[in-house]
């Protein structure tokens, strides 16, 4: 049993003990309270709640008030002698003073019980007080804005029978935002402990605390069931006599304030690798500690001094680290002699260039359109400070200053080192809310191309202690007094040839639509995202140069996989969704893949690009960069996709659709290390299916997903829906905090990305969808769907075609053969869905993929286990025959599912229509059917987006070098797997050139007007079946030219030289 008695701080105050009545939450008729009629052992009827109230990890929409000093949730309680906790009969309750209270006696202005349920539209005093209590007593919690407050006040109540000579006055306050719940117990005057006023064996004294009703979990306040319970007015767990504070929404009760048994907590749980994130610490009482004795340690060596804010709260600033990482955090209260570990780790997020895209911004540069800042220029910085943050600072002595820091590459570990800094402005008075300052960018020495960031520092002018540091993204300091040509040449001189590191990189998808859906293998480049078009910095690195008529990118994608040299590829697309293969709008091979080696990528790929191209007017320097960082060519790519959704429906990686309505935990997709291997897995994933509620005994939905790769640093990921219909995301044994980092964020991005050694976790803050992308070429999108009866998960998956012949599980064997997908673990193919009944699929295929409970990757809530789901798998029998429906129901379903009234043959319906129909018929829930239709259509569209556009000959070069007067003939023939009818168009080329659309032959005679001519030829090819189009650019350049802007209206850019030997059969030089 989880027996707990609150450890309290005994308040040795010589004045008056207890909470004064004026410190109670509003109560009485003047506060609009309901009065519970005088009674003995009575209870109210169920009181409806305007929103969910979470208590002991269960949501409640009703509550009961008992005259005998308590609230209950599952039913009325009239017991007058308090039964000892824990109670196992469903009596889930919160007791302020559970005893035999009798309010029938005549006590002038007393013997009254009041109650009130507030929503967020009335009585601001109650809401402000609850918010203040949480901020004060739970400093490690993020901001709490309650939407519902429940008060129960027992004012001068007497004991049974009708005793009036001694009275008790106390209050229970419950506050919730439907996610978190807090309870406050306030004791003003406690004169009697039991109806006999003694501690004799005849009477049991009152009891205070919390009971989950499961016979296991409970928490008692001190002195319960003893005559000393009247002393609750003298003690506290938050150092205010008579006041107790608790968080009560999880499966255990968390004490507010501090104490020896309090759980160590800190917040925020993540921050920039640049350091200076202020983390708030709660746990031990800091009252009698020397401030110098309190220290934090990050990892095994980074030790910093703490600042004690008050009895319950201390603060530490995170040190900077070379690389983004995860570290354990430790606290010492004895000057560093011993340390105690916090139960949670701290995540150092990667610093970003130009703009923060993977988390929330702390400092932004207003209206910045370039990724560089020039020495001597003015920039305006903006930041945000919350009231909560400023309340933790000393009054009148905090000043802000703006600092500019440079960072350099740590050659030892590939990370960063904070180098030098200068103060740009100081003595700024902090104000709550949005604040800004305009500063002049200073020089940090004579060197050019320095990497810098801005930091807003909160400094105590009396103690010189720093209370916070807010960081911007990285920028490049453009020192115009030092040219960038020398920088570019020095960089190029030390670079190896690309052939030594860029083999086995992915080819770029030909079209943007292909890149979008190939989540297994490509991720959005945060610096050039089609979803971030409003940012003036978006795609700043991929804009075509003025005067050269180069295309600019609207979206770029980065390869998720890397080769043996840790390199990656970038693919950029123009406004027509076509791959860019020349000019500064194009993507290149990255010497260091950004997701794996972000710092080395910044110093080894981005900085040279700026120094050689964007900050350098010498065209040949830019060509040198592209020679050492070649532009990536394109090819049609198809990576299989599938998914699971609704009352579970599945589409395998080969496109087979079926329905399996199991109850349990199953192998979703597992991947072997080779087609011949039988044991070694590089990836394993599982799903959990269960009814939405206890009454849904004929249908199940997906309620959990778990997975793990074989990366040496991998941990299992578990995403489950709790019994409160909340999404729980865990990595290993730790629940991840995906909320906003701190209260001091000036802007919140739509997405949050956290990088782990083996995967990237991204959360879409609009729809709550999670995307988990493993570096081995597997990406799974998990979308929580809220319907009438609760929450379910819809899954989409994208898998690299490198895993051909290696997969098994409910998503089948990926081998491009949809007829053998329903394959059992022993290799037996049970048939195709069109020839099988739902029952045959259920028992012959689906149930065979039940996991061994000992191999579960899932997280389990209290009272839950892998064995439970294994037992349900054996016992559960779903509905195999759809129920009959009325004509009116059928018409409603047709309308919801987009099925024409004339379409009576279900075999002709799309998968989206079929699954929508099935889910509504079985569940009577239109919202579930609609959700199923949407995801099935999305999966179908994903397949359509991966169709192959006509593909040009792969030996066609990106650049052709010719002599003046040479005659050029180039064959732009393309092929399509769908049709031989392809339409060719010369989109761009020299005015004197000719193009035959029937043969796709381009001809041109190079002018003899002198050196400096360069031309781009762009040809499009479009198939006549799906109207898919691809384009091919080829730069033709005079062999002796020094490149100048062309007078022919062509694009100028040269990627690399090709020998004529490689071009035979593709084009002819005459």
Image (tube, rainbow, N blue to C red):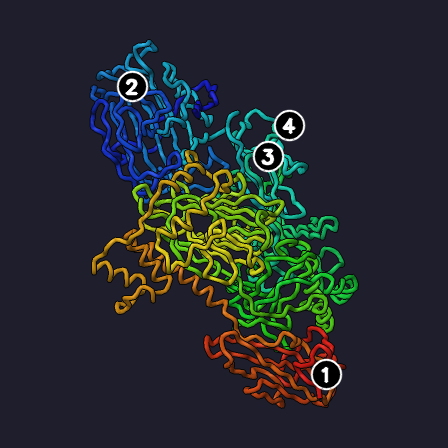
Indicate which disc, 2 or 3, sits on the residue closer to the N terminus.
2
Q: Nearer the viewer, mark 4 or mark 1?
A: 1
Callout 3–callout 1 Cβ contact below 8 Å: no
**Disc number for residue 962:** 1
Disc 2: which residue: 81
Disc 4: which residue: 338
Indicate which disc, 4 or 2, sits on the residue closer to the N terminus.
2
Callout 4–callout 2 Cβ contact below 8 Å: no
Left/right placement of residue 415 relative to residue 105 reads right
Disc 3: which residue: 307
Q: Residue 632 sits in which quadrant?
A: bottom right
Q: Nearer the viewer, mark 2 or mark 3?
A: 2
Compute the Cα span from label 3 to label 1: 70 Å
Compute the Cα span from label 4 to label 3: 18 Å
Q: Quadrant of the C terminus?
A: bottom right
Question: Dot 2: few (<14), some (14–19), or many (≥20) neighbours within 10 Å?
Answer: some
Left/right placement of residue 869 relative to residue 1005 reads left
Q: Nearer the viewer, residue 565 or 890?
A: 890
Question: Dot 1: few (<14), some (14–19), or many (≥20) neighbours within 10 Å?
Answer: some
Compute the Cα span from label 1 to label 2: 101 Å
How many numbered discs, if any? 4
Q: Secondary structure at mark 3?
A: strand
Residue under the image location 73 percent in, 78 percent down: 1061
Indicate which disc, 1 or 2, sits on the residue closer to the N terminus.
2
């Amino acid at each position: 049993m989880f027996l707990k008695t609150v450890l309290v701080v005994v308040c040795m105050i010589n004045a008056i003990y207890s909470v004064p009545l004026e410190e109670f939450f509003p109560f009485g008729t003047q506060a609009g309270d309901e009065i519970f009629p005088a009674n003995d052992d009575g209870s109210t009827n169920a009181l409806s709640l305007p929103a969910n109230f979470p208590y002991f990890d269960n949501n409640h929409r009703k509550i009961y008030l008992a005259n005998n000093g308590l609230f209950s949730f599952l039913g009325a309680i009239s017991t007058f002698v308090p039964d000892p906790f824990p109670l196992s009969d469903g009596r889930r309750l919160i007791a302020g003073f559970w005893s035999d209270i009798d309010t029938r006696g005549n006590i002038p202005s007393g013997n009254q019980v009041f109650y009130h349920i507030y929503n967020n539209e009335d009585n601001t005093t109650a809401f402000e007080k609850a918010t203040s209590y949480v901020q004060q007593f739970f400093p490690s919690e993020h901001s709490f804005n309650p939407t519902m407050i429940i008060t129960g006040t027992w004012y001068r109540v007497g004991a049974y029978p009708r005793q009036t000579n001694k009275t008790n006055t106390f209050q229970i306050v419950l506050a919730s935002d439907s996610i978190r719940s807090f309870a406050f117990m306030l004791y003003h005057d406690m004169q009697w402990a039991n109806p006999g006023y003694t501690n004799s064996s005849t009477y049991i004294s009152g009891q205070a605390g919390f009971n989950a009703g499961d016979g296991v979990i409970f928490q008692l306040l001190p002195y319960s069931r003893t005559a000393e319970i009247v002393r609750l007015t003298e003690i506290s767990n938050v150092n205010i006599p008579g006041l107790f504070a608790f968080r009560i929404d999880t499966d255990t009760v968390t004490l507010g304030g501090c104490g020896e048994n309090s759980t160590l907590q800190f917040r925020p749980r993540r921050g920039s690798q640049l350091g200076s994130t202020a983390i708030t610490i709660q746990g031990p009482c800091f009252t009698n500690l020397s401030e110098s004795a309190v220290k934090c340690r990050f990892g095994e060596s980074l030790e910093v001094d703490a600042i004690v804010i008050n009895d319950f709260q201390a603060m530490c600033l995170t040190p900077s680290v070379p690389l983004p990482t995860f570290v354990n955090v430790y606290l010492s209260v004895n000057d560093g002699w011993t340390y105690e570990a916090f139960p949670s780790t701290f995540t150092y997020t990667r610093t970003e260039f130009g703009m923060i895209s993977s988390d929330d911004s702390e400092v932004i540069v207003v209206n910045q359109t370039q990724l560089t800042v020039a020495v001597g220029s003015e920039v305006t910085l903006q930041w945000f400070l919350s009231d909560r943050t400023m309340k933790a600072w000393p009054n009148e002595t905090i000043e802000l200053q703006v600092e500019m820091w440079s960072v350099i590459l740590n050659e030892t570990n590939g990370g960063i080192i904070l180098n030098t800094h200068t103060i740009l402005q100081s003595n700024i008075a902090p104000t709550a809310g949005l604040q800004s300052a305009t500063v002049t960018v200073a020089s940090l020495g004579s060197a050019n191309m320095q990497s810098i960031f801005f930091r807003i520092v909160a400094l105590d002018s009396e103690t010189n202690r720093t209370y916070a540091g807010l960081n911007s993204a990285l920028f490049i300091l453009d020192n115009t007094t030092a040219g960038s040509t020398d920088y570019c040449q020095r960089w190029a001189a030390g670079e190896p040839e690309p052939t030594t590191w860029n083999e086995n990189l992915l080819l770029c998808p030909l079209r943007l639509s292909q890149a979008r859906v190939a989540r297994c293998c490509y991720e959005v480049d945060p610096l050039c995202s089609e979803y971030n078009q409003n940012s003036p910095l978006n795609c700043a690195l991929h804009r075509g140069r003025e005067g050269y008529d180069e295309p600019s990118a609207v979206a770029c994608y980065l390869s998720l996989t890397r080769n043996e040299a840790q390199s990656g590829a970038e693919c950029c697309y123009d406004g027509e969704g076509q791959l860019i293969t020349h000019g500064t709008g194009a993507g290149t091979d990255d010497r260091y893949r950004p997701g794996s080696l972000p710092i080395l990528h910044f110093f080894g790929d981005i900085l040279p690009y700026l120094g050689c191209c964007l900050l350098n007017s010498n065209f040949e320097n830019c060509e040198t960069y592209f020679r050492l960082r070649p532009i990536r060519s394109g090819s049609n790519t198809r990576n299989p996709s599938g998914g699971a959704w609704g009352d579970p429906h599945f589409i395998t990686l080969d496109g087979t659709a079926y329905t399996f309505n199991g109850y349990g935990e199953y192998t979703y997709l597992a991947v072997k290390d080779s087609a011949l291997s039988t044991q070694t897995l590089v990836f394993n994933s599982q799903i959990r299916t269960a009814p939405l509620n206890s009454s849904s005994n004929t249908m199940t939905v997906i309620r959990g997903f778990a997975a793990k790769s074989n990366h040496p640093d991998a941990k299992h990921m578990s995403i489950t829906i709790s019994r409160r219909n909340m999404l729980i995301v865990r990595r290993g044994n730790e629940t991840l905090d995906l909320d906003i980092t701190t209260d001091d964020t000036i802007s919140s991005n739509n997405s949050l990305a956290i990088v782990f050694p083996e995967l990237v976790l991204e959360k879409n803050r609009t729809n709550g969808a999670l995307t988990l992308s493993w570096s081995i070429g597997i990406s799974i999108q998990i979308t929580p769907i809220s319907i009438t009866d609760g929450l379910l998960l819809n899954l989409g998956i994208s898998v690299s075609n490198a895993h051909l012949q290696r997969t098994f599980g409910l998503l089948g064997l990926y081998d491009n053969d949809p007829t053998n997908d329903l394959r059992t673990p022993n290799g037996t193919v049970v048939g195709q869905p069109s020839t099988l009944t739902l029952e045959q699929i259920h028992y012959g295929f689906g149930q065979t993929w039940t996991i061994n409970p000992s191999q579960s990757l899932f997280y389990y809530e209290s009272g839950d286990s892998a064995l439970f789901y294994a037992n349900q798998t054996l016992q559960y029998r779903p509905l195999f025959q759809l129920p009959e429906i009325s004509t009116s129901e059928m018409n409603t379903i047709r309308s919801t599912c987009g099925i024409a009234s004339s379409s009576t043959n279900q075999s002709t319906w799309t998968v989206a229509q079929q699954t929508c129909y099935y889910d509504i018929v079985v569940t009577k829930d239109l919202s579930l059917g609609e959700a199923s239709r949407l995801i099935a259509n999305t999966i179908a569209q994903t397949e359509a987006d991966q169709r192959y556009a006509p593909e040009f000959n792969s030996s066609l070069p990106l650049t052709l070098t010719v002599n003046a007067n040479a005659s050029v003939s180039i064959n732009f023939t393309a092929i399509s797997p769908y049709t031989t009818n392809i339409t060719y168009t010369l989109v761009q080329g020299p005015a004197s050139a000719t193009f035959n659309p029937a043969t796709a032959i381009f001809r041109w005679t190079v002018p003899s007007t002198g050196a400096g001519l360069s031309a781009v030829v762009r040809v499009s090819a479009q198939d006549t079946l799906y109207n898919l189009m691809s384009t091919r650019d080829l730069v033709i350049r005079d062999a002796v030219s020094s490149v100048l802007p062309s007078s022919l209206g062509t694009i100028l850019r040269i990627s690399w030289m090709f020998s004529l030997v490689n071009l035979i059969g593709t084009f002819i030089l005459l």
